[in-house]
Structures are given as C-alpha cells and as structure tokens.
Amino acid sequence: MNDDIRAEVDARLKAKGMSRADLARTLSKTPQEISRALNGGARGGSIPPLWAAILEALDLELTAQSKDHE
C-alpha cells in the first residue's frame, strides 16, 4: 500500500481511539503483522505485483476514503 493509505489507516485508528495492537486483536493477527503492513517495507502491506503493474499502466493509484464520506 502507499504512504497515503498507511497515513489514513493511522489517522482512523487515532480517531477511533484504537492502537495497532487493538486492530491486531480485531483481525486475529499479531501486532507484528499489523506493524509490518503499516510501516511498509518489502513484505508487509505491499500491492501484489500484478495489481501494481495494472495500476501503473492505467495511471491509477489506490486511495483510502471513509465510508461515511458523504
């Protein structure tokens, strides 16, 4: 995922009063898995290569938006 999506997830966690550990418990994941996904890096939270190529070819990017954006 890109930095904007990671930032939006962190902002939403803060707004909901949740920690990354709370999110991990909610998703039945380890805190380490959540941290890897939200911190980026080679393994965690990356867009699968095929999807990255599709988005790049079509000049698109992923964004995160609140469900209650109306």
Image (cartoon, rainbow, N blue to C red):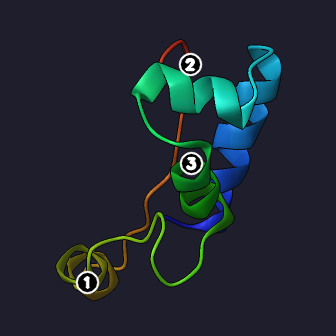
Q: Quadrant of residue 62?
A: bottom left
Residue under label 3: 34
x then y, percent, for residue 48: 27, 74
Circle 3: element type: helix
Q: Which mark is residue 66?
A: none
**Residue 54 location, x and y as percent?**
20, 79
Q: Earlier in the sequence, mark 3 or mark 2?
A: 3
Q: Earlier in the sequence, mark 1 or mark 3?
A: 3
Horizontal side, residue 14 vs residue 57: left or right: right
Q: What mark, if any, has residue 69 been given in the picture?
A: 2
What percent of the width, then of the height, locates residue 38?
A: 62, 56
Indicate left or right for 65 with 19 as reference.
Answer: left
Q: Which residue is mark 1?
A: 49
- Do callouts 1 and 3 mark residues in contact (Cβ within 8 Å)? no
Distance of mark 1 from mark 3, alpha carbons? Answer: 20 Å
Element marked by disc 2: loop
Q: Amino acid at mark 1?
A: Pro
Compared across the picture, whether 21 is left or right of 60 comes to: right
Q: Cα distance, mark 3 to mark 2? A: 25 Å
